[in-house]
Image: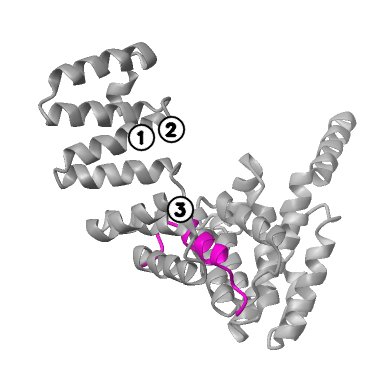
Amino acid sequence: MVVIEKERGDAAQKQQESPYAKRLASLFGWVSSWEEFEKLKDNPKALVEAASRKEVGSRTCEVWDTMLFKVIKYCERALELEPQNVEAWRLKMKALVRLARMEGEERKEIRVHNKEICKEDRPFSVEAARCAAEVLKLDPPKDEKSWREYDEIFTHAWNSNEFSRIKFEYDEKVLRANPNATSEDWWSLARYMPSRIENAAEKKLEFYDKALALDPKNVDAWFGKGVILQSQHAYEKALECYEKALALDPQRLEAWTGKGEILQSQQAYEKALECYEKAIELEPSRPGLWKSRIDLLKAMGRQAEADEAAKRADARFGKMWENY
């Protein structure tokens, strides 16, 4: 009986010393923090300072996850009082990022005991990205390395599009305020604009025009403007842009194909064929160019030439060219 009781005691002691038991005890040990919280709850600056100390302390704390929940609680109260408190948003973001890295049973365990913060429909990573968006709005980074760190937060939340939008809006604001902006700067802003920006085509045209106003020989801007105008079915204006691009750089392959597509749509078949042939001459390894030429030859009723071109394409690419 004594042995059994001793074994039971040893088992209970081990259970109390287990990481799970320590974490569980700490999760329910919020009472010890309430006194401090009650003292600080109407002082956002003091709340953020306390949260910062806890965030630092959590790095060496056994129950670091519980400490992070306290950081979140303090920050959320500070944000109730001061919604523009960037440091509160930043600390909450950091805590959520660290919690988001947990996987498996450990995360489940913490979700069970902290449902208020860890709702199933609001994962840590998603909430971290929301906080990151607020930080970027209130205090955008000044260097690309810091921007990349925020990009990782949004990527982890499967929301890279939102990061791209925020970064683009920041870059646009900075560039508009820069009196020394170059033609290349405006072209780059247009070229790498995220696809889901509102009125993206109109903005791109504006930026290409700014680039060309600073440097009328910017061949990339002429070509980019042509692509946008072609997508808007403004074919005559697009054709003019492609021709200006080719006057500056006759080796611009994409301008030849764009010009060929417009001429073909206008049934100017001979001129379109010349464009496709020039493009193939510049880059004979592109199956799509061969298909465009073959399809055009068929449309022109030149079946024998189309068949001969198809044999040459088969010899070079197999049947792969037919899928372009």
Q: How many marks?
A: 3
Amino acid type of the residue tagged 1 in the rendering: Lys
Amino acid type of the residue tagged 2 in the rendering: Leu
Measure the C-alpha gap from mark 3 to mark 2.
Answer: 16 Å
Q: Is residue 121 visible?
A: no
Q: Is residue 36 left or right of residue 60?
A: left
Question: Which residue is the site of mark 1?
Answer: 278
Instruction: Look at the picture and state if 122 lies above or below 18.
Output: below
* Span shown in magenta: 179-198
- Residues at circles 1 and 2 in contact by the CB criterion of under 8 Å: yes
Instruction: Look at the picture and state if 26 lies above or below 294.
Output: below
Q: Is residue 173 visible?
A: yes
Question: Which residue is the site of mark 2?
Answer: 282
For numbered disc 1, what is the local secondary structure? helix
Instruction: Look at the picture and state if 262 lies above or below 177.
Output: above
Amino acid type of the residue tagged 3 in the rendering: Leu
Of the 4 image quadrants, the one containing the C terminus is: top left
Residue furthest front as drawn: 247
Residue at 27%, 42% in the rendered image: 260
Question: Which residue is the site of mark 3?
Answer: 248
Q: Is residue 52 left or right of residue 316?
A: right
Q: Residues within 10 Å of mark 1 (few under 14, many from 20)?
A: some
- Specify which label sits upstream in the sequence, 3 or 1: 3
